Image (cartoon, rainbow, N blue to C red):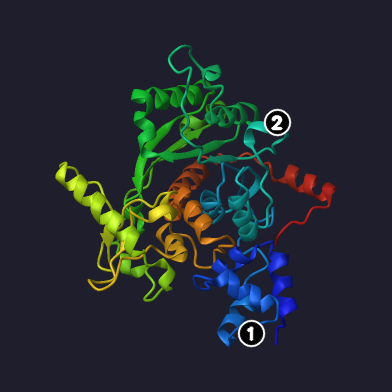
Amino acid sequence: MVNNLEIKQKRERLGLTQKEFADALGLGKYGDRTLRRWENGESTPSVLELASIINFPEKPRFPNPSITDAKFLMIDLFAGIGGIRLAFQSQGGYCCFTSEWDKFAAKTYRANFGDEPNGDITKINEKEIPDHNILLAGFPCQAFSQAGLKQGFEDTRGTLFFDVARIIAEKRPDAFLLENVKNLRNHDKGRTFTKIKETLEELDYTFEAKVLRAADFGVPQNRERVFMVGFNKRIGGELVPFKFPEPLSTPTHLGDILFKKVDEKYTISDKLYEGHLRRKEMHKQKGNGFGFSLFDENSIYTNTLSARYYKDGSEILIDQGERKNPRKLHPHECKRLQGFPEEFVIPVSDTQAYKQFGNSVAVPVVKAVAKEMIKAMDTVQFFTDYKANLLKEKTSKKECIYN
């Protein structure tokens, strides 16, 4: 039998607050209070609750492979919770550098991968980043204040894309994969996207881009993102026969990712629901289609999950019948909606979990792109061998190498 002190020690080993651990364990609306009573010895968890505490993982579920077994090295910029890394790691990638500035996303990343992300990429010297084969970056879309005034690489200075470009310029990876919102193509009347393309081509990389939809790759979400792929022309990148993946014919079904029952705390309040209904009616009278959206287990897919979902859940509400208000998605349903593995750990509060999954990627889409990239690079034996250097560096520093 686990006592109250052991419960507290477990939580502290995980580095979680009572609120975070309560949400991660799936406790109810006042779960942090319940957890506090357990830790103080005022009450005792049930057999099932105790099992959840004992079985909550303390070791990362998705550590790097051993360097000797890895097929290629990659770096993960603007990493978030590691959705892009997951996809490329499944294809044999070893992540040798990560950058993420948000402390809550970094906590989720650390819990799942065992790596401590470096902080703000704008403060990291590109010369200190390890050599790598593939650069991965889901960089934010930020205005290019100087776009159109000058030409080339220096024109991106002051934007977050500049940090991607300066690392590519210094480290010369074999390839890159960049991901962004679909509307990046139209930002500033298309000038931003053109500047990104011109900058990468100026650095002697090929450039191909395509909008891919999550629902076309087995995920029940109408999420569209633009993916940009390029290969180093100085070592024959134009010879890499890359093609973006074709949509799958697999039908999607929202019922496949929904729980049969969730805690009442996910049902929206009367006040919030009345506000949703009122705003929807106002939009209807104005002749537009804005407002909350209802889905159920029979829906083919949902709207795009956004980082603001925690506020009111308006873009994806689950119908619970005429006699009950709709509910928000459970964070674990959001995890499934983005195609993350079931064993992916959520060590943060529900609010942070909604933000993190809303900001992340649909993993199966990235995995499909990763497969095509690796297959194309294999065709012309395109990978530069950096593994020996990294192995030597890690051994000299006596760092742990996961097997």
SS under mark 2: loop
Please state which of residues 44 and 260 is positioned toward the viewer in this rendering: 44
Instruction: Choose the circle earlier in sequence order: 1 or 2.
Output: 1
Three-letter code, disc 2: Asn
Write the residue at 57% across / 29% down.
235
Distance from Cα at disc 1 to Cα at disc 2: 51 Å
Amino acid at pointer 1: Thr
Residue 63 visible in the current orientation: no
Counting from the top left corner in percent of width and height, residue 162 is at 56, 27
Q: Position of residue 116 (x, y in %)?
A: 69, 51
Question: In the picture shown, does residue 10 fall above or below 369?
Answer: below
> Where is the N terminus found, in terms of image quarters?
bottom right
> Can you tell which quarter of the image residue 295 is in?
bottom left
Relative horizontal placement of residue 142, taking residue 249 as reference (left or right)? right
Along the viewing direction, whichever of 264 and 319 lies nearer the viewer: 264
Please rate how many residues cluster around mark 1, counting C-alpha atoms within 10 Å: few if below 14, some from 14 to 19, many from 20.
some
- Secondary structure, mark 1, is loop
Q: Residue at x 83, y 52 (%)?
A: 398
Q: Quadrant of the C terminus?
A: bottom right
Left or right for 70, reference 224: right
Residue drawn at point x = 25 percent, y = 73 percent: 323
Q: Which mark is residue 44?
A: 1
Does residue 182 appear left or right of residue 145 in this picture?
left
In the picture shown, does residue 54 fall above or below 334?
below
Q: Nearer the viewer, residue 25 or 323?
A: 323
Q: Comparing marks 1 and 2, which lies closer to the viewer?
A: 1
Query: Residue 125: which disc?
Result: 2
Q: Residue at x 36, y 76 (%)?
A: 260
